[in-house]
Image (spheres, rainbow, N blue to C red):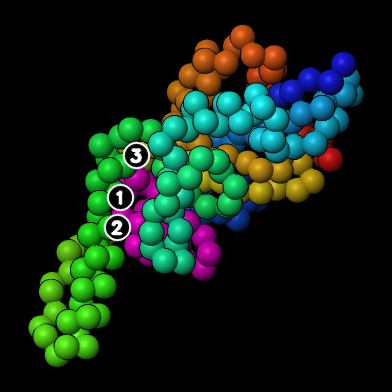
Amino acid sequence: MYIEKLIKYPFPEWANVFTDVNKLIVEPYCICYQYNVTQNGYGPYGFLTDIAQKIISLTFNELCFFDSTINSLKKCKNINKDGIYFYGENNENEKIMSEVYNYNHIMLKNKLREKKGLPLISLPSNPVLLDLYEDNLYRYEKVNELIKHGCGFIISDFYMPESGKTLIVFKPELWDEIVLLFEKEKVLFVELDSFNLLKAW
């Protein structure tokens, strides 16, 4: 009989995601999903089944993706792209989103004013999400700011041949909340001590 697994494991230090993972104020961990798993523990990875989609939609409601190419937050229903996502009805999330919106709005106004020869409006202090990356890595200082603010956020990444679509989580209690919420579903909750214990697919 095939089974489905939600798997938690420590963030692997070889994963080139942050400018300095050791300077993060919270130790991140990873969550991935495996389905059609055989008795030997082999099966494809990805949040693709009905149960997996249910876990995503109920755990990470009010989901927004930060599009760094245009410095904009977009509402979404699923985690399809690699990047940073904000979730939950959270005042701090709203503040972060407002910062980005207001900053972009003034930038756009200034472009129009410049064309008309009008004086420019003073820009507010840079949003936390501005300059989030350095050499395509998440700046640990920016991630720490989001953690300190109490934002609900995750980072989506992709690893092969193990783990597939992977969620990097910064909220220690989130795993237990997921287990409690979905304990009646036909899914196994597995905690591994290392990425190396995952089986390749």
In what element is the residue under mark 1? Answer: helix
Start and end of the magenta stretch? 128-146
Q: Which residue is mark 2?
A: 100
85 horizontally vs 98: left or right? right
* Residue 27 is a magenta residue: no
Could you tell me residue 24's position as x and y percent? Answer: 43, 45
- Whether residue 29 is visible to the viewer of this picture, yes or no, is yes
Q: Is residue 129 magenta?
A: yes
Task: Give the CA distance from mark 3 to mark 2.
Answer: 14 Å
Q: Which quarter of the figure has residue 103?
A: bottom left
Q: Position of residue 129 (x, y in %)?
A: 35, 57
| Cα–Cα span, label 2 and label 1 | 5 Å
Q: CA distance from mark 3 to mark 1?
A: 11 Å
Judging by the rendered image, the residue that carries numbered circle 1 is 97
149 on left or right of 184: left
Q: Which type of secondary structure does the marked residue at label 3 adopt?
A: loop
Q: Is residue 178 left or right of residue 164?
A: left
* Precedes in sequence: disc 3 or disc 1: 1
